[in-house]
């Protein structure tokens, strides 16, 4: 049983870090593009290196969270697989919509949907996971910050 948990954790790591990698490929130079560099950004915008550290930590914690959540169900849970997949797609698509296509309002809608979905994970399964729910909190906090940064760009550009 414990070996299966390690395998599942490893799979979640691959899928979650794959989302980060794939999203980065879709960014079209992202935060180093002239378009992004010339935007009016929020005064609370973190330094560039913070984004990498934050996402690395978030995906590590989220992989552990999802592993524990998956093990709470005794059989395959199609609903859980579907909402995880939607979360993955929203996470990846924001990079493309915002950085590649420069659709800041659509990006804001995508990140709000992602925030709502991560919030759903957080509160729907809090009774099942108890203390493990703290592992998804960094994701929700970071999405709150990212949403505010995206919103600022919409209003001040």
Image: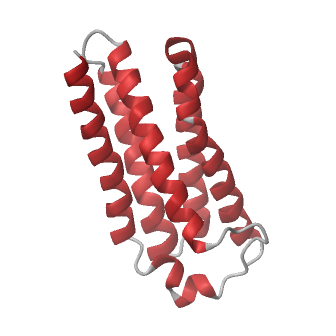
Badge count: 0
Vertical order, 123 against 136 (above or below): above
Q: Is residue 125 left or right of residue 80?
A: right
* Residue 9 x, y percent position in the rendering: 30, 34
Residue 144 lies, in percent from the top left, at 67, 49
Q: Is residue 4 above or below residue 84?
A: above
* Residue positioned 79% across, 72% down in the render: 43
Residue nearest the observer in this picture, 12 or 2 = 2
Residue 77: x and y in percent read: 30, 19
Above or below — where is 55 with respect to 41? above
Q: Is residue 120 visible?
A: no
Quarter of the image with the N terminus is: top left
Task: Choose top left, top right, bottom left or bottom right for residue 60.
Answer: top left
| Residue furthest front in the image | 2
Q: Residue drawn at (33%, 17%), measured in percent from left and top?
A: 71
Location of residue 78 (image quadrant)? top left
Type of colouring:
secondary structure
Q: Residue farthest to the top?
A: 74
| Residue 63 located left or right of residue 157 | left
Percent x, y for residue 153?
Answer: 70, 71
């Amino acid at each position: 049983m414990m070996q299966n948990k390690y395998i599942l954790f490893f799979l979640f790591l691959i899928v979650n870090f794959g989302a980060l990698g794939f999203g980065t490929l879709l960014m079209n130079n992202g935060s180093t593009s002239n378009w992004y560099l010339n935007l009016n950004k929020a005064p609370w915008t973190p330094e560039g290196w913070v984004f990498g550290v934050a996402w690395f930590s978030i995906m590590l914690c989220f992989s552990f969270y999802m592993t524990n959540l998956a093990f709470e169900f005794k059989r395959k849970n199609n609903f859980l697989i579907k909402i995880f997949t939607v979360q993955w797609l929203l996470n990846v698509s924001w990079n493309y919509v915002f950085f590649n296509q420069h659709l800041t309002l659509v990006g804001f809608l995508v990140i709000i949907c992602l925030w709502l979905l991560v919030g759903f994970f957080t509160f729907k399964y809090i009774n099942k996971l108890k203390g493990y729910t703290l592992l998804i909190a960094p994701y929700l906090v970071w999405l709150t910050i990212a949403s505010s940064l995206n919103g600022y760009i919409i209003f001040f550009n």
